[in-house]
Amino acid sequence: MGDFIQTKVLPLFMRFVNTRGVRAIKDGMMFTMPLIIVGAVYLLLFQLPIQAAADFVASLGNGAVVSYLAHGYTSSFQIIAMVAAVGVGYTWAKNDGWEPLSAGIIALALFLIFIPDYVGATFSAAGTVTALDSETAAQSAGSATVDTLSKYVVSGNFEALGEAAGAATPEALTKFADIQGKEDKADKVCEYIGAAVKTAADALPDPADNAELKTAVMESAASGAIAVAKTAIETTDASAINADELAAAVNAGAVAGGQSAINVYAPGGATGLNKTWLAGQGMIGAMIAGMLAGLIYSAFMKKDIRIKMPEGVPDGVAAAFTGLIPAAVILTGGVVVYGLCMGFGGVTPIELIYKFIQSPLQGVGDTLPGVLLFETLIPLLWFFGVHGATVVGSVAQPIELANQAENAAIFQRLVDGGMSRADAIAALPQNGGHIFTEAFCNCFQAITGSGITIGLVIFMVFFAKSAQMKQVGKLGLGCGIFNINEPVLFGTPIVLNPKLLLPFVLAPIVSNGGAYILTQIGFIPYTMGVTVPWTTPPILSGLLCIGWQAAAWQAITLVASFFIYLPFARSVDKDYLAMEEGQEAA
């Protein structure tokens, strides 16, 4: 069996790992790491888990510091797909031996061609994230204010907004309108608020999924509708209220308010760069754009199809002209593909990629069998001497990053919609959040190294009797704290050691499988975008990325790993001791 795997299976894996596409993805994705880590720090700082600390940060500069941190986050973490496109195209050309920056820039332009502008089909409640359910809406109606009801609008939850206004008591609506003694008119007016804002949304140029523009439009629409409603309450006798006229007036106010935001944010129409696809949702599309650009650019260079400048022309100028012909062909091809997709399907290339490639891949990763498959393959490949994390990571990492970026975007929308940090994290499962993210894997996949070998190391340091095990244990202890265990893998060895294969595979299955189940049942929260370098020690990583629940499970896993390895480690130690005693006797 071992010979079959080594001679038949492993060569296939290595052939796959060494393909130009996989190498470009694996190395190109590394360009996103600085933005992910720094952006995650920004996110953590303005969404601190300790309420007192969060309140302190929120008070700095009357809230200005939080807005600055949020801007830093959206300008780093939320553009990782753009950086991935550049990185993949750059790495492909570099690996093929050509000037790489031109290929990276062409890849970025091709990716941007694939994504939609703001203009598209009118958005509706069905196409937005439901931040507040009907029950929450009804509860909030009892203390409704202009700000409260506006937050339903910002979150895109028009149904909840309508229910909040319709279910509110006259007293609550009086508070909402801030007018005393006009309860009988308040409930009549506010009945139309939810429908008015929805009408405004349908009547306006569409911001599609751009969060900033949508927020501005809907806040202004709500303000316009509310202003008309308040005026009607203040000036109209209860007996004189005409339902149809009032509804039309509120609708007109909402449309006017929303249109004012359009005019401010996008004069001449709601067009421009759509930020929705620049992070998690666009990750696979960015990789495809990078690979296409790298492949075609390298093919043109190999065939020497380029503009050649005379000697003496500065290298920078010559390089710009070198990429002109492949850029024209690649980008023109991208425009043609975009036109065909829009003309025949009414969707952009990135939307097709997301629907038919990225979503299914994310769905597989979010299942328990998918998680266990990844976790089984990593130690199995290591057992045969292949870097399992590199091989599996080349496939899994883009999915992890896409899931993590989507979680962060959903979390931010929920917080912007009025939810607290804790409530927004708790609402992630109901709003399309993912379990399988990079932060999840960093916390549970390979703590103390692939195979979670800390249990074996503890045995070797404190209980082993053979000199070899003791020495390897001392070497592996310091490294293991920072999730590096190559000294243990090759010094024990675990590689090609059948006695240690079972615990080597079982320990990460227990860690990841248990974490997945605990996340699914609600004990461990979903990750909300915060991540740390993979070398961050366990328990600390769980506390920073997720919370005390993850840190507690990490601690349990570390203890469990000792008992998982114990009987197998004793057997290996006994063999080494007998061998050492035999050598001494000889």
Image (cartoon, rainbow, N blue to C red):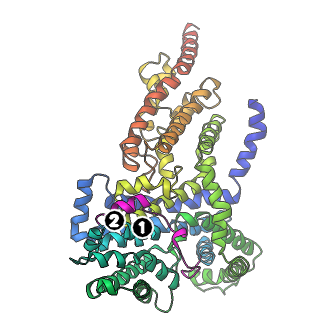
Residue with the mark numbered 1: 163
Report the front residue among 121 and 376: 121
Q: In the rendered image, which quarter is residue 462 located in?
A: top left
Q: Name the kind of residue labelled 1 in the image.
A: Glu
Residue 173 at x, y percent in the picture: 30, 72
Q: Residues within 10 Å of mark 2 (few under 14, many from 20)?
A: many
Q: Name the kind of residue labelled 2 in the image.
A: Ala
Residue with the mark numbered 2: 141
Residue 75, visible in the rendered structure: no
Residue 548, visible in the rendered structure: yes
Q: Residues within 10 Å of mark 1 (few under 14, many from 20)?
A: many
Q: In the rendered image, which quarter is residue 524 located in?
A: top left
Q: Quadrant of the N terminus?
A: top right
For residue 525, side relative to residue 186 (left or right):
right
In the displayed image of the protein, which residue is found farthest to the front?
A: 239
**Who comes first in sequence, dot 2 or dot 1?**
2
Q: Quadrant of the C terminus?
A: top right
The residue at 73%/41% (across/down) is: 10
Which region of the structure is painted magenta? 116-143
The answer to whether the residues at label 2 and label 1 have Cβ atoms under 8 Å apart is yes
Residue 299 at x, y percent in the picture: 74, 71
Report the front residue among 211 and 171: 171
The label on residue 66 is none
Residue 153 at x, y percent in the picture: 41, 72
The residue at 46%/73% (across/down) is: 211
Say whether residue 138 is magenta.
Answer: yes
User: Looking at the image, is 256 positioned above or below residue 3?
Assistant: below
The residue at 32%/69% (across/down) is: 148
For residue 316, side relative to residue 178 (left or right):
right
Q: Secondary structure at mark 1?
A: helix
Predominant secondary structure in magenta? loop
